[in-house]
Amino acid sequence: MAESAERPLAAPVAYLLLVRMWSRSALQYRTSMLLTGLGQLFTTSLDLVAILVLYSQVKVLGGFTLPQTLYLYGTTRVAFALSDIVASGVETLADAIRLGTFDLVLIRPVSTLAQVLADQFNPKRFNKLVPAAATLIWALTDLPVHWTAAKIAVCAGTILCGFVLYCAFWVLSGCISFLAVDARELANTFTYGSEFATEYPLNIFGRPLGLTLTFVVPVAFVTWQPSLYVLGHPDPFGLPGFLRLASPVVAAVFSALAVLAWRACIRRYRSSGS
Amino acid sequence: MRVYLTAARLSLRRYLTYRSSAVAGVVTTTVFGFIRAYVLVALWKQKPEINGWDLADATTYAFLTQGLMVPMGVFMNGTELGPRIRSGDVAIDLYRPVDFQCWWLALDTGRAVGTGLLRSLPPVLAGSLVFPFALPLSPVRWIAFSLCCVIGYVVSFSLRYLISIIAFWTMDERGVAALVFAVGFFCSGMILPLTVMPGTLGTIVQHTPWATMIQIPSSVLFGTQPGGVGYALAFGLFWALVLMGAGRLLTEAARRKVVVQGG
């Protein structure tokens, strides 16, 4: 024990240990886990039903056919589900700050981010991946796309970069909890809002909002821009073509910003003191 | 009666206390309103009229959902009763010389009115500045809309009360609540208006109790409710009575049989 006190655990190791601990705790309540997991599975599938209902009324939405929208939806959902598995522990942060229990996080010799991201980890989150992956496979089989090595690489990269960007959004939503303790819902706009927006072709939001979602909050780089490349679809906003392959750069820059913001928040943190 | 009014008033005051939280909530619901409205705009651009609704009806609806969802408790897992059953605190509630169900109705009504006062208008106003809007001037429509909202709220409460009270038997209502929430979120018309749902799916979702919470008040407001206001009120009252009645029966059963947790 003395040794571990001298040399703190590396953040990824600590994260995995914490995840194992929380999983074992969650597995004690199997029925509740099973039912809430089923509920989650159901909720995510109903979003898909909504898209199918939309396309039962029209053939083309914002210039995109059903398989194309399903591709946008599928990549978004898979990337978001992965980030949800890894990082949605942030959601309990606001309560921890309000109740003062966040002080405990600070006195442990383990990375704060690892502790916060792993908080309340529950294996049921893997359920969200099932309908997401199924939809993506469905879209991939239905798409009239000529698959080249480059397109396959971009498709895989979309999910990877989307996952990294969403993780950055989760961390930033945690930073919002530091600034405004009871603004939990505001933090949701960042995470669930950006997910919801990227499920649909971005051009349906109109030019001003579409460009904001590209250059201010880089939601467009989650799936929209790389998907235009994969689908071979012209950019309805007429933006330059190199942006379609810019997701890795945007993801790297944005996650660096998120980590810096997180560190700034930790430095300025004042305990609620009660 | 006075005790229920007092309970509702105190609960209302509690919900009016957290104003900065309400501001954050308003921003969030408004953002989601915009996203939902743009999705509907894309649909209505392709098809200018769907089942009697035009573009203005659809965008107005997108923001009405955002205004109504918090007071209607669409996002809530049951009522505040659930956690009290789980912790055993409910023993104190059972001692109170009041009707158990009405007591919780009073507390939850305070919540609905409080959140409604703080959070219903701003998203609708923000939406009306940007999108075509179809709010009628006729006072009769607004009165009918208000009545439908009240009935929809009672249906919402009785449904959530039923979910909470399940905890008397299962010790944890959260699993059931999550399932019911998923169904309710879709069937209340939060994701898409129930009027655009085709065929059998449309028929089913328009007859569940969740239809009374957002869809029917909105249709009544736009004057597009099939069967008119009379049908809307009768349909809502039917579900309110059925669900309230079921809540009463289960409450009685719980009082007789169940042992409270927490020693």
Image (cartoon, rainbow, N blue to C red):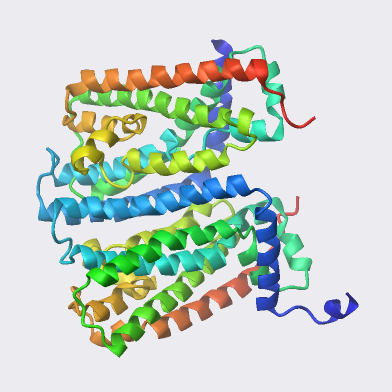
Residue B140 in percent (x, y) is at 21, 21
Residue B196 in percent (x, y) is at 20, 43
Which quadrant is the N terminus of chain B positioned in? top right
Residue B236 in percent (x, y) is at 32, 22
Image vertical order of residue B190 relative to residue A48, above or below: above
Q: Residue at x 18, y 57 (%)?
A: B42
The answer to whether residue A186 is left or right of residue B34 is right
Residue placed furthest toward the right: A2
**Nearer to the camera, A216 or B244:** B244
**Nearer to the camera, A62 or A209:** A62
Tell me, yes or no, if residue A69 can be seen here. Answer: yes
Residue B156 in percent (x, y) is at 42, 29
Q: Residue at x 58, y 60 (%)?
A: A123
Question: In terms of image quadrants, where is residue A71?
Answer: bottom left
Q: Residue at x 65, y 71 (%)?
A: A114
Question: In terms of image quadrants, where is residue B83?
Answer: top right
Image vertical order of residue A104 relative to residue B2, above or below: below
Which quadrant is the C terminus of chain B positioned in? top right
The answer to whether residue A172 is left or right of residue A155 is right
Tell me, yes or no, if residue B24 can be seen here. Answer: no
How many numbered circles does the render carry?
0
**Nearer to the camera, A235 or A213:** A235
Image vertical order of residue B253 relative to residue A170, above or below: above
Image vertical order of residue B25 relative to residue B187, above or below: below
The answer to whether residue A158 is left or right of residue A25 is left
